[in-house]
Image: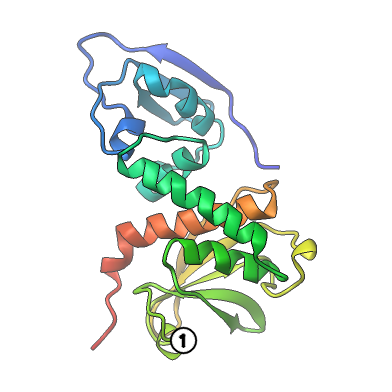
Amino acid sequence: MSKEFAVNIDTVPSWFEMPCIACDITGGESRAKSVVKASSGLGLGTCDDHTDVTYQVMRSLRTYDLAGLRTSFVTAGLTAEPHPGQQLADAYRAARHAAAAGGPTEGDMLRAALATFGIPSFYGKDRGVSCVLVAVDRTADEDDAHTGARVLLHSGEHAMRPARQHDKPWAASLYAADGEYINELFAVRPGLPLDEECATAALSLASWLTANAHRYPRAL
């Protein structure tokens, strides 16, 4: 299991200007009434309506990356109908159902979850390691997916084992069009049921692609 941080809540003075991060993520506007701080050294502002979900997020949050924040709040149960956060929450729930119905391999379950976010995926191999491959530009052409900037989602050295053998959380690595490794985008925290893990990986990647895909255009 991943480490959980100790969390405390401090009120902020009435003159202190800080947005509620959860409201910002869902497209709303609200001034924070409190700051939720964790022993990780991180802290986030929250309004009264979002104190509980922010508290839950801060127990495991490790960075302020916007895509990661969005994923953390949605998987913690944030909803705000009819704002965009609700659409993400609905897609996340659909991804869990799709993954649970997918199979028989761990990769099949992940690909089913990715499909609910409109992300085409393919099986691939990297130095003998099987993985799930996603083109940054979301191309549905398998040949093109291998030639542009791409994300490889891997679980140890496997992606095509029977789902019951899955034993390492999905992680995502970014590669340039020429195959050069760039960096790791995220790793799903351990200990989740596989359907939830696949849905979290799919949501994490969807959030990252929305925020960053434009930085990796396909060469003409």
Q: Residue at 38% across / 77% down in the picture?
A: 149
Q: Residue at 35% across / 25% down in the picture?
A: 45
Q: Secondary structure at mark 1?
A: helix
Q: Which is nearer the eye, 62 or 108?
A: 108
Q: Position of residue 98 (x, y in %)?
A: 58, 60
Q: Which is nearer the eye, 220 or 141?
A: 141
Q: Is residue 72 left or right of residue 86?
A: right
In this view of the protein, can residue 187 be seen by the observer?
no
Neighbours of disc 1 within 10 Å: few (<14), some (14-19), many (20+): some
Q: What count of labels does the image hold? A: 1
Q: Which is nearer the eye, 8 or 164?
A: 164
In this view of the protein, can residue 150 be seen by the observer?
yes
Q: Indicate the colouring scheme.
A: rainbow
- In the image, residue 62 sits, relative to residue 122, either above or below, namely above
Q: Which residue is mark 1?
A: 142
Q: Is residue 117 left or right of residue 27?
A: right
Residue 160: which quarter of the image? bottom right
Q: Say which amino acid is labelled 1.
A: Glu
Q: Quadrant of the C terminus?
A: bottom left
Q: Is residue 185 left or right of residue 3?
A: left
Q: Position of residue 85 (x, y in %)?
A: 36, 42
Q: Quadrant of the N terminus?
A: top right
- In the image, residue 124 sits, relative to residue 116, either above or below, namely below
Residue 73: which quarter of the image? top left
- In the image, residue 217 sits, relative to residue 93, either above or below, namely below
Q: Position of residue 167 (x, y in %)?
A: 75, 59
Q: Residue at 38% across / 74% down in the picture?
A: 138
Residue 3: which quarter of the image? top right
Q: Residue at 34% across / 20% down in the picture?
A: 47
